[in-house]
Amino acid sequence: MTPDRKQTGVVAAAKTSDTAAPGVLRQIGQSKEFGVLIALAILCVFMSLASPYFATSKNIFNVLQGMSTIAIVAIGETMVLVAGGLDLSVGAVLAVGAMVTARTMTYHGFNPWIAVGAGLLAGLIFGTVTGLIITKGKINPFITTLGMLSIGRGLAYLLATGLQGTVASNVPMRDEGVNFLGAGYVGPVPFSVMIMVFLVIVFSIFMAKTVLGRQIYAVGTNEQAARLSGVNVDRVRLFTYMATGVLAALAGVMTAGLLSTAATNLGIGVELDVIAATIIGGTSMSGGDGTVYGALIGAAIMAVVRNAFVLLNLPLALQTITIGVVIILAVALDRFRGMRSKRTS
């Protein structure tokens, strides 16, 4: 190659690089997750100005610790929604996982980590049953998971009180190692936050890079086309409910570890926060669109909003109303995105 050709090649490569970089930046800037991240940043700046306590390291880690269980459950809910489903039972599964772990450890003398495995297995079984009813029984996910929510709550009470129906509703978690999952720290960082970050990275890679992850998107985008392409639609959907059950049970074990007790009221209302976090993070309720890291950002927004009410000393009633408004706005935003995408396609 002559010097002129070499120089021309270098110039061409430089031009390609110059045009590629803005293209990547433009793609990032137009993503739903980037817009949500900007909203989170604005919210954090506002809270930093409104309260001198918000930006302290202690409060930041408290917020992260508080959002960790919501974010972990939201990972599973994201997969369910992307595949075109819905799971309203995650709060009850969270309570069941915590109660099974505490009861087998405290009252039946199981090894603490075997008890944790039993709690996760309970979540897996719960998710499997839910998925089979939806995929094989062809029952609407909303109706199925609403029913499983009630069943899970009943199981949590049964595990806590026994068949005799005593008034006891709490079962202590007496192992420091298990409690470390929810209450422990590695330096200044809560261990639950480290678990959350690890799971977000793992499932983000899983959804983006694996065959099964891509099949989840395919099923949610066009179920009939995915079926004709050889995708086992029922198996893919069943997997999402199974994974969500395990993640919800893990969140339950972590929550019980943080409180050093498993209570029957664990996880009440969690399903609303989880669904709101996933939708705020860009996951579509109509399926086929959403990311795990988007759900993480959505969970962070929910956590900052709750923390704001505490720091600003606002009434609990107003906090509850605001969370309800946020959920409605999140669903409305999802509907607006869907209508806009149909117009542009």
Image: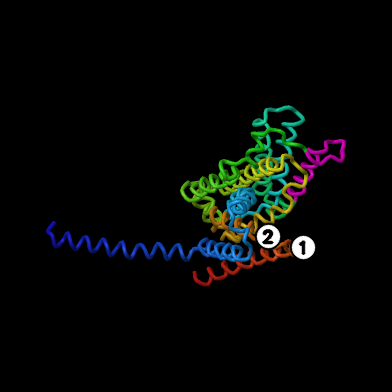
Whole-percent x and y of residue 141? Answer: 68, 53
- Label 2 sits on a secondary structure element that is helix
Q: Is residue 40 magenta?
A: no
Whole-percent x and y of residue 105? Answer: 72, 31
The residue carrying pointer 1 sits among few (fewer than 14), some (14 to 19) or many (20 or more) residues within 10 Å by Cα, namely: few
Q: Which residues are magenta?
A: 147-170
Picture quadrant where residue 172 is located: top right
Q: Which residue is mark 2?
A: 311
Q: Nearer the viewer, residue 126 or 247?
A: 247
User: Quick one: which residue is furthest to the bottom in this view?
Assistant: 343
User: What kind of residue is marked 2?
Assistant: Leu
Q: Is residue 161 magenta?
A: yes
Up the image or down, 260 lies above or below 64; here it is above
Is any part of residue 74 visible from this angle? Answer: no
Q: Nearer the viewer, mark 1 or mark 2?
A: 2
Q: Do the residues under discs 1 and 2 have CB atoms within 8 angstroms?
A: no
Q: Which residue is mark 1?
A: 317
Q: Mark 2 or mark 1, which is nearer the start of the sequence?
A: 2
Picture quadrant where residue 21 is located: bottom left
Up the image or down, 229 lies above or below 321; here it is above
